[in-house]
Amino acid sequence: MNITTKTIAIVDDHELMAKALSGLVQKYEEYEVLYEVSNGKELIHRIKLKMIPDIVLLDINMPEMDGYETASWLKNNYPEIKILALSMNDKEESIVKMLRNGARGYLLKGCKPHELKQALDSIVQKGFYYTEYITSQLIKSLNPDSLQSPLDKLGLNEREINFITLSCSDLTYVEVADKMCVSPRTVDGYRESVFQKMNVKSRVGMVLEAIRLKLVEI
């Protein structure tokens, strides 16, 4: 293993998937699989034994300790470990929750092998992997104008900021409408306006942009 090789831990309760991932990763010269475990508790046990990987490929739905809990624990205890979530779940709420819990990227298990390599490379080189959910605006270097806050630049009003804050959670849009005491149709209007002002195309894009601009705390 050379100096530039990054170590990877695979956390997935489906043994066949874990073995397939391991075999795939081993083909990449820049990466080395440290171990495979079936849940978050096993991962934490290994980490406490000083078997600390650079990157964790993390499934979401697992027994004992799922991906959300595991990601949150890693963020709080080993923030230097980069998390790439890998799941069959493509629901926006799940993706948003994983990103809020510290994941640096999110891949669907149905992705092509080259996408996994691309995601790993991006996480190592840039610190994140945003896939097609995010516009190129999010990965450009931020050159903030010291005279103008991000809120002023975007032209967001108080209701839109409230909408963004509530949407940066696992609430559905219907539940967001309930919290804001407005109709779902009104929330749809806020969403369209916010997406346009933030130049994003999805809820995930909005959340990541909000985190980047520090409109919400993570």
Image: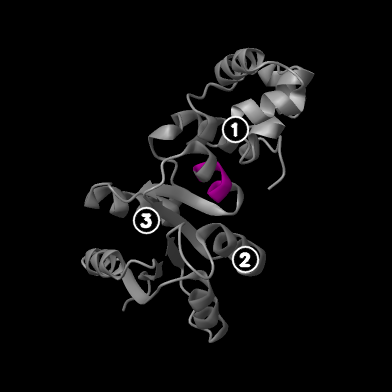
Q: Nearer the viewer, residue 143 or 77?
A: 77
Mark positioned earlier in the residue sequence (1 or 3): 3
Query: Can residue 149 be seen by looking at this rendering?
Result: no
Eye-nearest disc, 2 or 3 = 2
Reply above or below: 121 against 9: above
Q: Which residue lies at the image location 68% right of the left edge and 48% below the top edge?
A: 218
The answer to if 191 sits in the magenta stretch is no
Q: Which of 123 and 68 is in front in this view?
A: 68
Eye-nearest disc, 1 or 3 = 1
Reply above or below: 139 against 103: above
Q: Quadrant of the N terminus?
A: bottom left
Query: Can residue 161 be seen by looking at this rendering?
Result: yes
Disc 2 to disc 1, C-alpha distance: 25 Å
Disc 2 to disc 3, C-alpha distance: 21 Å
- Write down the residue under mark 2: 73
Q: Position of residue 54 (x, y in %)?
A: 46, 68
Neighbours of disc 3 within 10 Å: few (<14), some (14-19), many (20+): many
Reply above or below: 76 against 142: below
Eye-nearest disc, 2 or 1 = 1
The segment highlighted magenta reads: 95-99
Residue 113 as seen in the image, left or right of residue 133: left
SS state under label 2: helix
Residue 26 as seen in the image, left or right of residue 216: left
- Write down the residue under mark 3: 120
- Write down the residue under mark 1: 172
Neighbours of disc 2 within 10 Å: few (<14), some (14-19), many (20+): some
Mark positioned earlier in the residue sequence (2 or 3): 2
Quadrant housing residue 157: top right
Q: Position of residue 31 (x, y in %)?
A: 32, 67
Reply above or below: 84 against 30: above
Q: Is the magenta stretch mostly helix, strand or loop?
A: helix
